[in-house]
Amino acid sequence: MTVNLYDLSPEGLAGLLAAWGEPRFRANQVREWLYDKRVSSFDEMRNLPKKLRDRLKTETTLGVLAPISEQASHDGTLKRLYRLPDGQMIESVLMPYDDDRRTACISTQAGCAMGCVFCATGQMGFARHLTAAEIFEQAVLFARELEAQGERLSNVVLMGMGEPFHNYDESLAAVRRLMDDLGIGARHITVSTVGLAPMIRRFADEGLQVRLAISLHAATDEERSALLPVNKRWPLAELMVACREYVEKTGRRISFEWTAIQGENDTPEQARALGKLLKGLLCHVNIIPLNPTGGYAHGPSAADRVDRFAAILGECGVPATVRVRRGIDINAGCGQLKAAVLNKQADRSE
Ligand code: SAH
Ligand code: SF4
């Protein structure tokens, strides 16, 4: 079996090359090509002897992600679908902002087991966890392409397909590699979770400066369980205790995500309930109108409802921002490109 070089720790790579009889300094040279220069082929590793390059070519791979489709939005958002060696598909999105920020949104699982009703990934069900290397490589590829254009990948969010805290170890290993191997600052990395309370506690103990986002979407158990089935396992009271512990332990602010669904979770009463729930907590609420998906019949809240919602939160002393939906014309919501490709394949086979 070929070895994915992105799977190897520094020691793992040194061990492999030592077993091939290579001098010790070669491991550092290879790591430089992989992580500092981020080359896309073995032939570019010019200071390695040809014999070693040939052996690397036959016995290892430079990553495993094969791009199979891509869409660019009017607003500059780029969405890409990759095939993994076992045929699974995952998505990554690159979002340019007006300032110099370039943010990669990457996946942590193929599919997702959490079943949130409005989410295209949740509607697909769970296929498998990604390895740390598969998570990390999504950011490497964008970093490499941006650099070729004289730009730099500045931010990474684990907000693509999958629930990072359901794949905790690999997601955290990927986060560490984003910092160590790709040089992304911890404060420029965000992990988003649907609210697995025990893992929020564990994350608080990691001692990382990485940002935490929690997908809340409802302020009562009844409403939240209807949207996010995981709420039955870890209801709001338990989730909020974990959140408060996180803030106390880390001194860090939590971002709460609120996907605004017209007529569902965008009323003044719900805004007041949310204000009460979050009162006194170091946090910020991001309100993002729903990206409609095939398996969910509701639409995004109208602008005036969203503004009213944010204003009520403000009156309750809870800071809130209304976010623009990025890449709406290319279905850049979580899991939507894969859903679109699968639909097309289904159309063709009919
Ligand atoms: N599983 C994690 C991270 C991936 S989802 C989580 O749920 O937090 C990233 C964000 O996209 C979450 O806040 C999720 O609720 C939101 N999301 C999913 N589907 C959406 C849709 N159709 N429209 C708007 N936001 C959506
Ligand atoms: Fe999974 Fe997040 Fe989608 Fe929920 S919103 S199904 S947790 S990816």
Image: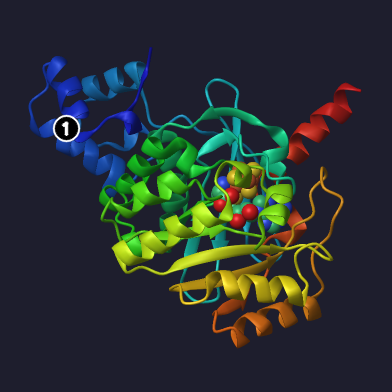
Left or right, 244 with reference to 235: left
Q: Quadrant of the N terminus?
A: top left
Q: Residue at x 66, y 43 (%)?
A: 229
| Residue 201 seen | yes
Queried on whether the Cβ of the residue with tag 1 lies below 8 angstroms from ligand 1, the answer reads no
Q: Residue furthest right?
A: 350
Left/right of residue 239 with respect to residue 230 in the rendered view: left
Image quarter hosting the C terminus: top right
Q: Is residue 264 left or right of residue 166?
A: right
Give left or right: position of 343 versus 193.
right
- Judged from this view, the residue extending furthest toward the top is 1
Vertical comparison of 116 with 54: above or below: below
Q: Nearer the viewer, residue 116 or 109?
A: 116
Q: How many marks?
A: 1
Give coordinates of residue 263: x percent, y percent: 84, 65
Residue at figure coordinates x 19%, y 34% from the top left: 10
The amino acid sitting under disc 1 is: Ala
Q: Is residue 106 above or below residue 99?
A: above
**Residue 107 picture location, percent across and down:** 53, 43
In the picture as drawn, the residue positioned furthest to the bottom comes out as 315
Residue named by callout 1:
27
The answer to whether residue 140 of the structure is visible from this angle is no
- Residue located 34% across and 47% down the image: 202
**Quick one: 24 or 319, which is closer to the camera?**
319
> Few, some or many C-alpha atoms within 10 Å of disc 1 (few <14, some 14-19, many ≥20)?
some
Q: Which x, y percent locates residue 87?
A: 60, 22
Residue located 56% across and 61% down the image: 95
- Estimate the x, y position of residue 324 in percent, counting from the top left: 67, 71
Q: Secondary structure at mark 1?
A: helix
